[in-house]
Amino acid sequence: MTLNQPQSPDAPCPCGRPQPYGRCCLPLHQGQPAPSPEALMRSRYSAFVLGLSDYLRQSWHSSTRPTELTLDGSPDWCSLQVLSSSEQGGQGKVHFRAIYRTGPGFGYLEENSDFVREQGHWFYIAGDTREGELKPGRNDRCPCGSGRKYKACCLSVFPSF
């Protein structure tokens, strides 16, 4: 998906939930408070996909928020996997893996993120990240998010990979 591409409210939500964007992440992008750390993290992933740097800054806690945020050079994000999510009181944690394209292949960014709730709003604090190359098997689901097997999807497009 191209950065800053308008997203139709009826389109599938980039965060991977089964609701359309208009009922999933769009209300949060328009200022509605996230009901949980996981919902905020999903909306932030969607904001990265859609190039919404203002939303990313607004949802970042003021104690750790960067003064500027540019998404130039961001990868082509493909899919999101939430591995775990928890909240206790005003603290939250989300462990996720975001898949992106690297030319003919795929990479991943995995993060254990911390969140805090203040005045009814969740904010991203920081996360411990690691990145790596993703090497799907021929019969694995394609990392691009199509739901098809890798051999019938992106492997057939990039057979020399």
Image (cartoon, rainbow, N blue to C red):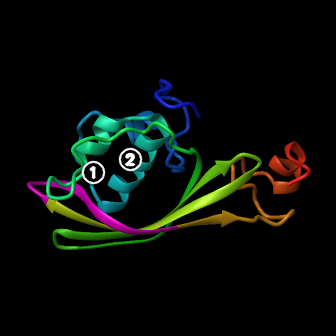
Question: Looking at the image, is mark 1 or mark 2 nearer the viewer?
Answer: 2
Q: Which residues are magenta?
A: 118-130
Quadrant for the C terminus in the image: bottom right
Quadrant for the N terminus in the image: top right
Q: Where residue 124 sits in the image (x, y, percent)?
A: 27, 58
Please check the rendered image and state whether residue 128 is part of the magenta-colored stretch, yes or no: yes
| Residue at image mark 1 | 34
Q: Where residue 94 sits in the image (x, y, percent)?
A: 38, 68
In the rendered structure, which disc, 1 or 2, sits on the residue that comes first in sequence?
Answer: 1
Nearest the eye: 71 or 18: 71
Task: Categorize mark 2 by other alpha carbons within 10 Å: few (<14), some (14-19), many (20+).
Answer: many
Residue at 89% x, 47% y: name it: 156
Is the residue under label 2 in contact with that under label 1 (CB below 8 Å)? yes
Q: Is residue 122 positioned above or below 5 on the image?
A: below
> What secondary structure is found at the residue carrying circle 2?
helix
Quarter residue 91 falls in: bottom left
Q: CA distance from mark 1 to mark 2?
A: 8 Å
Residue at 50% x, 31% y: name it: 3
Q: Is residue 7 positioned above or below 61 on the image?
A: above
Q: Specify the farthest residue to the left.
A: 119
Please check the rendered image and state whether residue 86 is part of the magenta-colored stretch, yes or no: no
Residue at 37% x, 56% y: name it: 41
Q: Where residue 43 sits in the image (x, y, percent)?
A: 38, 47
The three-letter amino acid code for the residue at tag 1 is: Ala
Q: Where residue 102 sits in the image (x, y, percent)?
A: 67, 50
> What secondary structure is found at the residue carrying circle 1?
loop
- Rendered image: mark on residue 87: none
The three-letter amino acid code for the residue at tag 2 is: Ser
- Rendered image: mark on residue 43: 2
